[in-house]
Image: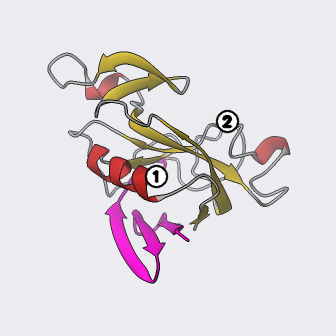
Amino acid sequence: MARITISIAKQRLYLEIDSQTSEYIISTSRFGPGEKKDSFCTPRGRHIIRAKIGEGETRGQIFKDRRPTGDIYSPDSHNLEDGDWILTRILWLSGTEVGKNRLGNVDTMQRYIYLHGVPDDAILGIPRSIGCINMSNNDIEELFDLVKVGTPVEID
């Protein structure tokens, strides 16, 4: 079974499958770690992938409210700085620790925290998101195909 570990300090995601580990460069929140609703921080602790969204969509597909818009991101027609781009695939996280990242004012799923793709011209490896875990489009496509709903995700 697959297992994901995310290091906020290293800005890396590690995917372990059958004792083999793959490493991906990511970006977590520019506001740091934290669990509170409306904090725009990246939540810590034990999570699972609750939903996989975007299977079969074109690379660069722009999502709004977890739905494909039909628009493909292009630096020629979109501005990187115009928003929090959610592209290509979404892995929606749900916390598993009641009072820490599940239920109440700290619920990861209700905060809409995802692993998702970002524009190819976005810089990864430094905190830059508003809570989510950002990945390159290539990497989120690869990860999406390797994990299932229910895959454990540890964020520290």
**Residue 60, horizontal then vertical, whole percent:** 29, 31
Is 25 situated above or below 114?
below
Q: Residue at x 30, y 47 (%)?
A: 136
Between 89 and 57, which is closer to the camera in this rendering?
57
Amino acid type of disc 1?
A: Thr
Pick the residue in front: 145 or 122: 145
Q: Position of residue 64 (x, y in %)?
A: 49, 21
Q: Position of residue 62 (x, y in %)?
A: 37, 25
Q: Nearer the viewer, residue 128 or 115?
A: 115
The answer to whether residue 105 is left or right of residue 62 is right
Q: Earlier in the sequence, mark 2 or mark 1?
A: 1
Q: Amino acid at mark 2?
A: Asp
Q: Bounds of the magenta span? A: 1-30
Q: Which residue is mark 1?
A: 28
Give the side of residue 88 with respect to residue 133, left or right. left
Q: Secondary structure at mark 2?
A: loop
Q: Is residue 115 positioned above or below 7 on the image? A: above
